[in-house]
Image (cartoon, rainbow, N blue to C red):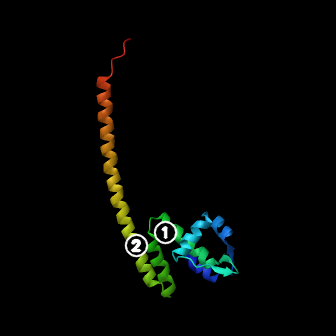
Amino acid sequence: MTAAEVAEHAPTRLYTVTEMAEELGVTPRALRFYEDKGLITPSRAGTTRVYTRREHARMQLILRGKRLGFSLREIKQFLDLYDVDPTHKEQLRTLLEAVRHRIDDLETTREALTKTLLELREIEDQTLRTLAKRSPKATA
């Protein structure tokens, strides 16, 4: 069961901005940022923002998506599909495509890093050999 599905079936629990931020390890400013981007939609109790389990679950997915390197646009697309596709098939297809694309990007990055590290180690070795040749011999 996904975080969002758990949230839908759980009893209603409201979080204040401070509670939500502390529980998720983000700042209240971060919550407002994601709200401004349309990724979460807190309710209002008077002038106070209150977050339900739905927003809590969405924030967990947002933070996970960011940690995995997805853009906010990709995350929003994924979350929006959840709301319009009751079968979640399109959401899953979109997720699979995005995950495969991210894996490809990371594999390409890993290959580039491996090449760069090899080249840097070669330069390091050359530099050490050159320094050793130019250093005066210690007398015993």
- Considering the numbered disc 1 on the image, is that residue within a helix, a strand or a loop? helix
Total labels: the figure holds: 2
The image position of residue 13, as x and y in percent, is 69, 78
Image quadrant containing the C terminus: top left
Q: Is residue 47 above or below residue 124?
A: below
Residue found at the far front of this picture: 47
Q: Distance between the residues labelled 1 and 2?
A: 10 Å
Mark carried by residue 97? none
Mark carried by residue 65? 1
Identity of the residue drawn at 56% across and 77% down: 40
Q: In this view, does 137 lie above or below 75?
A: above
The image position of residue 46, as x and y in percent, is 70, 81
Tag 2: amino acid: Ala
Crowding near the residue tagged with mark 1, few <14, some 14–19, many ≥20 C-alpha atoms within 10 Å: some
Q: Name the residue under label 2.
A: 98
Image quadrant containing the N terminus: bottom right
